[in-house]
Image: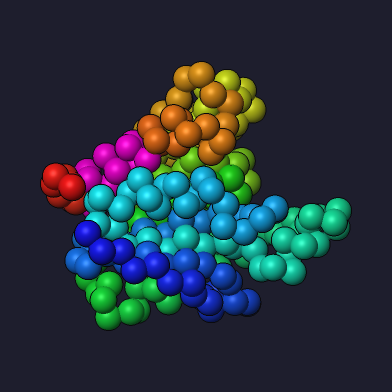
């Protein structure tokens, strides 16, 4: 399978965001991975997710919801604490931009979010339910989306590390507020899914299973 990977600049609400668009020869669905980088760009966890999901023929836009200036301000101690509503609007605009490309016309769409990016996906889905058919949150800071959870009407999978009591608690609370269809997966033995290779692999498989169910993807054939 051939994958074309291209750096992109994405017009998103009130700014322009950096991302990377990976497209197989015959994409079966479109997913946007949303995260907020507070260190180096090109974060390995999101890259690993892209690699693990390639066999399912997904077109994937990996998108940092913060600009370079915003990341710099955060890293030098001037905390760039964005209203999650703004990040949600950026994500909606980014999905509209990538969906408008002819090669993705008619494809089912999904959001994957990590950390604050997961909160943004929930806010975006609450605001624009028709925009996506599935959501996956990994180590999500779901408490930042507390006001939007009951308005999310999209199948949502929450994945957390069992040993991180704070993240588990906030995701259990979010799970209670979300409408069906929903699922909460606790991966044992780790505090942070995004920093453990085995946990990330399991998260990728759970994500693929969720997408197969709600995006109606075919199982991958022999490679």
Q: Which quadrant of the structure image shows residue 158?
A: top left
Question: Colour mode?
Answer: rainbow
In the image, residue 164 sits, relative to residue 31, either above or below, namely: above
Q: Residue 74: percent from the left, percent from the top? A: 78, 56
Give the residue displayed 51% in from the left and 67% down from the top. Answer: 19
Q: Image point 66% across, 55% down: which residue? A: 40
Q: Residue at x 27, y 80 (%)?
A: 102
The residue lying furthest to the right in this view is: 77
Highlighted magenta segment, given as a residue range: 204-215
Q: Return the x and y of residue 176 as percentages of the image width and height.
A: 47, 31
**At which x and y percent is residue 49?**
42, 47
Asked whether the viewer can see residue 135, the reply is no
Query: Is residue 205 shown in magenta?
Result: yes
Q: Quick one: 142 or 209, which is closer to the camera?
A: 209
Q: Is residue 134 left or right of residue 86?
A: left
Q: Quadrant of residue 157?
A: top left
């Amino acid at each position: 399978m051939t994958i074309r990977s291209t750096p992109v600049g994405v017009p998103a609400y009130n700014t322009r965001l950096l991302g990377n668009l990976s497209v197989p020869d015959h994409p079966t669905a479109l997913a946007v991975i949303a995260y907020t980088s507070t260190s180096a760009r090109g974060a390995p966890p999101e890259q690993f997710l892209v690699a693990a999901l390639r066999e399912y023929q997904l077109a994937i836009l990996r998108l940092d919801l913060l600009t370079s200036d915003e990341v710099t301000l955060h890293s030098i101690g001037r905390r760039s604490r964005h209203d999650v509503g703004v990040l949600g609007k950026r994500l909606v605009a980014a999905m509209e931009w990538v969906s408008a490309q002819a090669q993705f016309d008619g494809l089912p769409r999904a959001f994957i979010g990590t950390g604050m990016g997961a909160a943004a996906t929930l806010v975006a889905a609450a605001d624009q339910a028709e925009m996506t058919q599935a959501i996956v949150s990994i180590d999500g800071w779901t408490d930042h989306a507390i006001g939007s959870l009951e308005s999310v009407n999209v199948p949502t999978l929450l994945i957390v590390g069992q040993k991180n009591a704070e993240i588990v608690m906030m995701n259990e609370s979010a799970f209670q507020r979300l409408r069906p269809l929903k699922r909460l997966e606790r991966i044992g033995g780790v505090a942070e899914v995004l920093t453990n290779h085995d946990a990330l692999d399991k998260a990728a498989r759970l994500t693929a299973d969720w997408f197969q169910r709600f995006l109606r993807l075919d199982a991958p054939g022999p490679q």
